[in-house]
Amino acid sequence: VIHTYQVLAGEREAMNPKTSQAVGPKDDLHRAAALILASTVIMFFVLYLLNAIGFGLGRICGLKAAKSTRFAGAFVEAAYYSFSLACITRITWNSPWFWPGGWAEVMYDGRIQKIKDLEPYMVPADMKALYLMETSYYAAGFIWLHIRTRKKDHWQMAAHHVFTIYLLFLSYTTGYMRIGLVVMFLHNVFDPFMHIAKLFNYLKIEILTNLFFAGVLISFPVTRLYYYPLSIWSAWQGVCNGSKTCPGGVWDKTPIEFSLIGFLMALLPLHVFWYYLIIQVLRKTLQGDQKDVRSDDEDEDEETPEAVKEALRKKE
């Protein structure tokens, strides 16, 4: 963690093989599990603190309690995903394999191990720290998901968190962590645009809402519907391409490697569903209604006229 902070501060070289640490079969999985558990607890309290800050900001800006609750949820996700994206970009920016032109090397780790100056199942310390941070966020987020007010896509989000945690676990235990960082980046590019657009929408700052929503409309299909499938194809081609350790070619994969590819593919239908919701937001916006399609009952109640609420109470 200290090394990663120094890398982010520019005091040390990123992705330095000399800082390598064990993963997968070489790591003590009991120790790794304990570390993830401790990080999840810390991350949960960080999310709680960010949520409290977001709620306070919402109230300061004049939002009612229910709307401030939703403002706080968007604030938490905007803060985390912006930070995560900044960390991933800072650490991997100078790595040729991180960009689409170098994805032929995205599966050079793991049992294939074609990375210069690294032994099998060894990765730079900052790469391991990114995995720890991302895993703890989704684990804490899964818990938070069941505590906060539920939205229309609650179970889709829960499934997404489970898939993501399992994918992180699979890539960690098999040592295929380059593909993990690529997938993290492709997923996280969209999120800051979406959640910052929500924040400005709650504050009724239309020009900034539209600006960031335009970023949503561009970033989501580009990263999740175009580049993400290409990264899966690169992973499929790269796990085994006729090397000495797997001479059978692309079909010479272990069951875990097939599972890794399968779970990457399983996220695609969720992406299609969420892009459908985004298009629904666009349609409603063009019709003059900027209400978030992922709204919850609490928010709907807030926007119900008082006379209607009173009539409903009398009817009950």
Image (cartoon, rainbow, N blue to C red):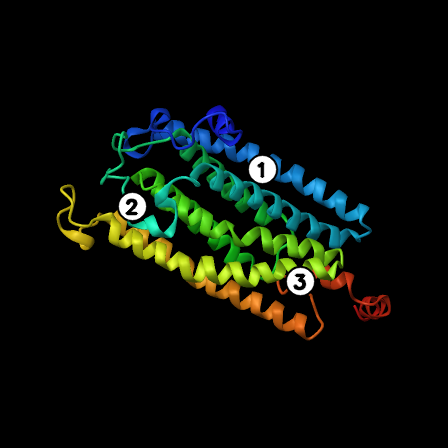
Query: Is 287 above or below relative to 277?
Result: below
Relative image position of residue 43 (x, y in whole percent): 56, 36
Residue at image coords 41%, 35%: 127
Q: Label 2 crowding class (10 Å Cα cut-off): few <14, some 14-19, many 20+?
A: many
Is residue 202 placed above or below 287 in the rendered structure? above
User: Amino acid under label 2?
Assistant: Glu
Q: Is residue 268 visible?
A: yes
Say which amino acid is labelled 1. Phe
| Side of 180 where 259 appears, left or right | left
Which residue carries the number 1 mark?
44
Q: Which mark is residue 105?
A: 2
Q: Earlier in the sequence, mark 3 or mark 1?
A: 1
Residue identifier under label 3: 210
Q: Is residue 166 visible?
A: no
Give the camera-side residue of 105 and 49.
Answer: 105
Which residue is at a point 27% across and 47% down the rendered structure image? Answer: 256
**Residue placed furthest toward the bottom:** 287
Q: Secondary structure at mark 1?
A: helix
Image x and y of residue 28, in percent? 34, 27
